[in-house]
């Protein structure tokens, strides 16, 4: 098969975070992990072109996926392989969008990333095989990818046995016993020594390691972002009051504060009266402008990024986080103040 | 149940006296109220339901809803008359009420405890010049009065069922080797329209307290909380605390019912930690071997559950929590926002799962369903989150979630059997 391989700027050897803003490009033959993948694939399959894009550029621009699929088509791809992205959020999101766009366009595609990668849900129905958590697992991951490619070439579908990440849906259903009765059953089972039984798996929550403090705050660009649903009065873009599926951006350039009556919180999860009386208490524009004037921070980023946290599912929140990080990095922002409600 | 000239109860039929009911809502904050009834099976949708109360009375001397309709220092216990199968509720716009619905037939009726009750529904108009807070207090008092008024009508009727509620097992009493299991009931305490009242007072700022479950059955806990409809515990659910009821059902056979601890759900992290630590200590001091922990609300409230389960398990108690899942419409997202590191979790269903509801003939409480941007009677597609009590945090509902693999395993087992 003629394979087109997608990697980010880092694995293409074009640079680290400083180069994350570069746009899409095609390189002849194999690059970076593609070299080992090519060896593992043997002679039957050939990586003809490697597509590359900077993580920030690609993650903050959803149209890039289609552009890259078009480039893969031009290169005569019979299969598009993206990653492995391991646990990297932006890279994983782009790989997932890319294989989803390829499949939608009728081009077979395969991505690889860690099952906990925040981007994984964007792959839709396209196959994703599991990668390790970091590039230390490059070789075993590429062995999985190579075996998956060989199987796809036979026309077979990938299964969990091939390392495919199963999107095991949790299906809601009505049962005879109400939840309180099931809780009593469960507590009795646990008291009898069964420490494993549970209806929902427990544990497994991320611990976010804080970044190092900003080195030179007086020259840093700082952004304001919020999950408090603060939007222009009247909510012209119809941000949801709960269960957000998207985020919005609003210019705050030249504004010294957020005027009452011009902004409102549409969050359905807290009493908004005080917030609407002084929107600066949800997004502290007044204070941060003062810090900017006093030279405590270098500059305030000219856009406010907004979503609503109320009832928003974890997968969406993680995706917003990845997209915001890419967006802010691309804009040269060094620090963000995320206000929550 | 029907509406008539005067309230009376005869042979399992309740007639709700229209003018008598309206008079119970007389308040300067309300311009008018309208009284309707809706029965299971009716092609009726109730839009924007507020609180729901079960009709109960202790007879002519009063005594239910202490702190609201009776002094707290009255004699406790004695007989309580319950109009089982009936409920009174208000419905209509209130600014902090997250819009939900009850359908009296179809899939939403199967999912809500209030699709299965005969409901007296109060629609209302706020008086000019009255604040929404004043209207809300007037509605709450009116609902409690109406609940007592209806139950009073049946006080002389012979009971169909007599339930004797045993007192909780006290520490030091012999258990015959059975484990002592109690309930921790978290109450939401987030200020106006987000508050639950204990003896008429907000529990905000309080420490957890061991509480007489008979007092809860007699209405010591009253809801003024209008967040996430599916994740609410209306007064009716407290009066019938499902965890306490299920513990009592096994009392003396598989366990000893050890009691109830009421806790606030504070909004500050340090307060959450304080309340959780203190609750765990209280359970230990009260001799619990295990506790079932419940909440009200989502996100913020999930942390209260998580911290309590972890605190209990760290103290050597066995803990089980009831959570609703938020795994997205297709169920593939992570199910919990915050979850315990230990213990076990019962699922009350998926908040995001869509439910298709057929059109109905009549709507009460409003003419539009804003969350679906549709006429109130239209066929709509809503998240489970919108159906009142469908994900009941106190375990009154029948929903759960299973992963596809679990279902496959279950099918195999079923086939083998």
Image (tube, rainbow, N blue to C red):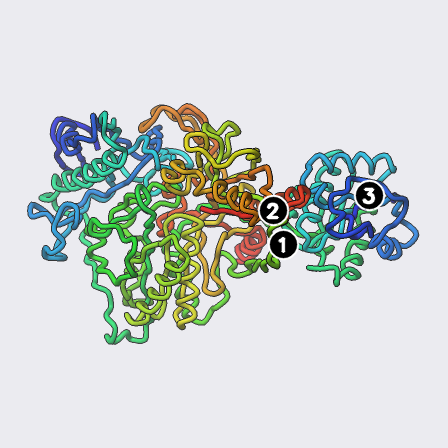
Task: Give the numbered dot on residue A51.
Answer: 3
- Work out whether disc 3 and disc 2 sit on a shared chain: yes
Give the total number of marks visible in the rendering.
3
**Residue at (66%, 50%) from the top-left corner?**
A89
Q: Is residue B133 above or below residue A159?
A: above
**Is residue B29 found left or right of B410 in the rendered image?**
left
Please report contact status of discs 1 and 2: CB closer than 8 Å, yes or no.
Answer: yes
Snapshot quadrant of residue B224: top left
Judging depth in this view, the residue of B40 and B335 nearest the camera is B335
Secondary element at image label 1 = loop
Q: Which of label 3 and label 2 is nearer to you?
A: 2
Secondary element at image label 2 = loop
Secondary element at image label 3 = strand
Among numbered discs 3 and 2, the one appearing first in the sequence: 3
How far apart are the alpha carbons under marks 3 and 2?
A: 36 Å
**Is residue A280 found left or right of A141 in the rendered image?**
left
Residue B218 seen: yes
Please report contact status of discs 3 and 1: CB closer than 8 Å, yes or no.
Answer: no
Residue ID for mark 2 = A298
Task: Give the numbered dot on residue A216.
Answer: 1
**Residue at (45%, 50%) from the top-left corner?**
B299
Q: Is residue A237 above or below residue A314?
A: above
Q: Residues within 10 Å of mark 2 (few under 14, many from 20)?
A: some
Residue A125 seen: no
Judging depth in this view, the residue of A339 and B297 nearest the camera is A339
How far apart are the alpha carbons under marks 3 and 1?
A: 36 Å
The numbered mark 3 sits on a residue in which chain?
Answer: A
């Amino acid at each position: 098969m003629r394979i087109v391989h997608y990697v980010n700027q880092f694995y293409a050897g074009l640079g680290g975070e400083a180069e994350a803003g570069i746009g899409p490009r095609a390189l002849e033959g194999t690059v970076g992990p593609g070299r080992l993948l090519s060896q593992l694939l043997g002679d039957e399959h050939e990586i003809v072109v490697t597509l590359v894009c900077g993580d920030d550029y690609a993650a903050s621009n959803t149209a890039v996926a289609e552009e890259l699929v078009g480039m893969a088509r031009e290169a005569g791809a019979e299969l598009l392989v993206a990653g492995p992205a391991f646990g990297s959020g932006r890279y994983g999101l782009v790989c997932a969008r890319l294989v989803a766009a390829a499949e939608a366009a009728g081009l077979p595609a395969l991505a690889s990333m860690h099952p906990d990668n925040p981007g994984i849900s964007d792959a839709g129905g396209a196959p994703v095989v599991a990668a390790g958590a970091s590039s230390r697992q490059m070789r075993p991951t590429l062995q999985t990818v190579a075996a998956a490619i060989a199987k796809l070439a036979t026309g077979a579908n990938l299964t969990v046995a091939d390392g495919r990440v199963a999107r095991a849906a949790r299906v809601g259903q009505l049962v005879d016993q109400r939840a309180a009765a099931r809780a009593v059953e469960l507590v009795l089972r646990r008291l009898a020594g069964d420490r494993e039984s549970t209806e929902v798996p427990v544990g497994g929550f991320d611990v976010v390691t804080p970044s190092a403090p900003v080195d030179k705050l007086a020259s840093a660009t700082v952004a304001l972002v919020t999950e408090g649903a603060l939007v222009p009065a009247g909510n012209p873009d119809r941000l949801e009051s709960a269960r957000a599926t998207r985020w919005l951006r609003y210019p705050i350039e030249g504004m010294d504060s957020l005027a009452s009556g011009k902004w409102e919180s549409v969050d359905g999860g807290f009493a908004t009266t005080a917030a609407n009386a002084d929107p600066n208490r949800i997004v502290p524009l007044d204070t941060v402008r003062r810090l900017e004037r006093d030279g405590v921070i270098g500059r305030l980023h000219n856009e406010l990024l907004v979503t609503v946290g109320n009832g928003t599912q974890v997968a969406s929140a993680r995706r917003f986080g990845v997209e915001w990080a890419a967006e802010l990095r691309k804009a040269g922002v060094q620090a963000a103040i995320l206000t929550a409600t | 149940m029907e509406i008539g000239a005067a309230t009376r109860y005869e042979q399992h039929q309740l007639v709700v006296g229209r003018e008598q009911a309206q008079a119970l809502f007389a308040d300067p904050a309300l311009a008018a109220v309208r009284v309707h009834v809706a029965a299971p099976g009716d092609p009726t949708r109730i839009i924007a339901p507020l609180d729901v109360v079960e009709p109960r009375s202790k007879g002519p001397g009063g005594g239910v809803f202490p702190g609201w309709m009776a002094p707290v220092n009255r004699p406790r216990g004695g007989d309580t008359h319950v109009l089982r199968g009936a409920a009174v509720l208000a419905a209509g716009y209130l600014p902090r009420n997250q819009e939900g619905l009850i359908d009296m037939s179809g899939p939403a009726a199967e999912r809500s405890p209030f699709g299965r009750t005969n409901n007296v529904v109060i629609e209302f108009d706020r008086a000019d010049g009255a604040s929404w807070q004043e209207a809300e207090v007037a509605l709450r008092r009116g609902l409690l009065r109406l609940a007592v008024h209806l139950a009073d009508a049946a006080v002389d009727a012979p009971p169909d069922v007599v339930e004797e509620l045993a007192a909780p097992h006290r520490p030091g009493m012999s258990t015959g080797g059975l484990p002592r299991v109690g309930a921790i009931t978290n109450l939401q305490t987030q200020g106006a329209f987000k508050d639950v009242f204990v003896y008429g007072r907000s529990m905000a700022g309080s420490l957890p307290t061991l509480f007489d479950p008979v007092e809860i059955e007699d209405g010591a806990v009253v809801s003024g909380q209008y967040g996430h409809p599916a994740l609410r515990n209306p007064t009716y659910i407290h009066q019938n605390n499902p965890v306490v009821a299920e513990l009592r059902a096994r009392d003396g056979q598989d366990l000893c019912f050890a009691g109830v601890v009421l806790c606030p759900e504070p909004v500050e992290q340090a307060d959450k930690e304080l309340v959780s630590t203190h609750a765990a200590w209280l359970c230990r001091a009260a001799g619990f071997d295990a506790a079932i922990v419940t909440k009200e609300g989502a996100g913020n409230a999930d942390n209260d559950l998580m911290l309590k389960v972890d605190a209990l398990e760290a103290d050597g108690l066995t803990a089980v929590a009831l959570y609703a899942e938020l795994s997205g419409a297709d169920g593939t997202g992570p199910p919990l926002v915050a979850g315990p590191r230990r213990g076990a979790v019962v699922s009350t269903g998926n908040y995001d799962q869509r439910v298709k509801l057929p059109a109905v003939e009549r709507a009460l409480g409003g003419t539009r369903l804003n969350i679906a941007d549709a006429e109130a009677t239209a066929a709509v597609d809503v998240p489970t989150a919108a159906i009142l009590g469908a994900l009941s945090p106190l375990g009154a509902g029948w929903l759960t979630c299973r992963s596809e693999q679990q279902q496959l395993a279950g099918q195999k087992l079923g086939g083998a059997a």
